[in-house]
Each structure stands twice: as structure tokens, then as C-alpha cells.
Amino acid sequence: MEPFDDDLAQFAAVGAPPLPANRHEGVTEHDGAQIWHAACGARGNRVPVVLLHGGLGHSGNWGHQVPALVGDGHYVVTIDSRGHGRSTRDARPYSYELMASDVRAVMDELQIERAALIGWSDGACTALMLAMQSPERVAGAFYFGCNMDPSGAKRFEATPVIDRCFARHVKDYAQLSATPDQFDAFVAAVSTMQKTEPNCSAEQLAQIRVPVTIVQSEHDEFIRREHAQYLARTIPGAQWMLLEGVSHFAPLQRPAQFNRAVQAFLARINA
């Protein structure tokens, strides 16, 4: 039977499973910040995979995905976004464009010419920004649970699942961050970005020329399904996928189901 954590009780209590112990960790100095990253698996003929987590989270939230991807023979890189997890930031406001440039800097340091980007929520916005900025570096983008303009977001309503996820973020930030006493300021800065960005027009989306899969959860708490469908219609060649029975936290709730969606995307990229 596949493991389920639909109410995130397990995640709230202990977090996601730890990343593989044999990972190679590093820090990339870039544009006023130190960007933490880790690599797992061996390089081969397949396109490297870069995992980009959601807002307020960190690389450890991919604990269900990294072992599965490495087991399938992928070289996998996880990155703590600027100011998240072990990464630092300067005093500038957050922006998805800035975080996309951080991803490119990590790829440069690891000598990754092109990568398949798996983005979750804020990480998806970052992935598509990079696809627009530097399409030659992106083999494809898996876009899960995010919007490309403010109209795509639902009105926020707290739920027990969201509260449990937030409680986990509080604990992880205190444990991992170089500024553990600044969580409230961190949340305020990220929230400002989320309320005002991204602002991609239909014309900009239509210029994306890398393979894209738009993935929406049946019960997403934050993103309107119509908006995700709009993205799938507007980005040339984009594929649409609906994950049934899960919400914005699908990688944690039903990891096997989410991993199958990622595997289908990567099979398309590596075909």
C-alpha cells in the first residue's frame, strides 16, 4: 500500500524523510547571498534534475522524491532558495527573477549546462523565470501548484493542513537558518513577493520554447484550477496533468503519485 500523509500529521511531527547521506553539499556565493545546494546520484546520459522547493520551505521537503529519482538513475540537485533553509540573503526584496539567477549560478558552479527543472509553488515560478531568461539552460520545466500573475491565486483561507505545514516550516527555519530569530520578517518578505509577483503576460508565456508540464492538484488551497489550465493553453506545447485526491502539498501527501507524474515528465525530456 502506498504511503499517505493527507493531513500532513507525519510531516508536522518529523518532517520529510532525510535527504540521502551520501549527498555532496556546497555553497555558491552569488549576488549578495550564499546559496546552499546538494547533489545526489551519478552523472550519466540523462539530463540532470534540479528540484526547486516552495515558499518558506527548503530542500529537505523533497525527501520523498530525491531517493526515487536517484534510484531511477538521475543526477539530482536540490537548492535552498535565497533566504530559505541554509541559504542566506541580503537586504533586497525577494524576487523570482533574482532566485532564478541563483539557480543559474549553482548550475554554473556544478558545471551543469542544461537541466530539467522540477518546481513546486514558488519553485515553479522560479523555474519558469529561468526558462524565459535562459532557455538554453533548461531542458524542460515541471510546473506544480503556482501562478504566473496575481489573478491565479485564491483568497487565502487557513486550514489544519496549512497550519501543520507552517508549523513545520517554523521548526525547520529555527534549526537551519543563519538568522533563526528572524522568521517573522522572513515570512513578511516572502509574502510581499507572492502578493505582487510574478506578472507574466500571455505574450511572455507564449515565448517559452522549452517543454513544460503544468501540474495541478485537485484540492489546491492556493491556485485556481482555471489559471493552471490557462497556463497549459498559453505556453506552446505545454502538457496538462491533474493530480486527484491531493492538495498543494502532494509531494508530501502522496509521494508515489507525485513521483509518477515527475517520472512521466522526465521520460518526455529524456526521450
Image (cartoon, rainbow, N blue to C red):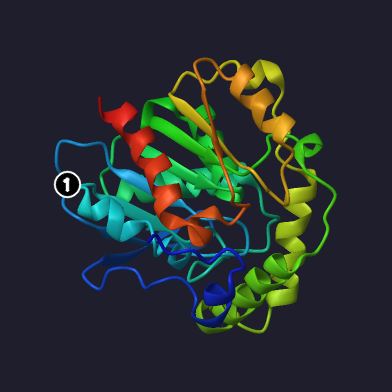
Q: Quadrant of residue 12?
A: bottom right
Query: Where in the figure is residue 133, as x and y percent of width and height?
Result: 52, 30
The image quadrant where one finds the N terminus is bottom left
Give above or below for 110 relative to 236. Answer: below
Question: Is residue 267 or residue 140 the one in the foreground?
Answer: 267
Query: Where in the figure is residue 214, as x and y percent of width and height?
Result: 55, 32
Residue highlighted by disc 1: 43
For label 1, the crowd category at 10 Å Cα-Cα, with few meaning under 14, some 14 to 19 and many 20 or more, is few
Count of marks, rendered view: 1
Question: Is residue 76 or residue 158 the one in the foreground?
Answer: 158
Query: Where in the figure is residue 48, as x and y percent of width and height?
Result: 28, 42
Q: Quadrant of residue 117?
A: top left
Q: Quadrant of residue 202?
A: top right
Residue at 38% x, 44% y: name it: 260
Question: Is residue 179 or residue 184 the one in the foreground?
Answer: 184
Q: Amino acid at mark 1?
A: Arg
Give above or below for 128 relative to 81. Answer: above
The image quadrant where one finds the C terminus is top left
Residue at 21% x, 54% y: name it: 71
Q: Name the secondary structure under disc 1.
A: loop
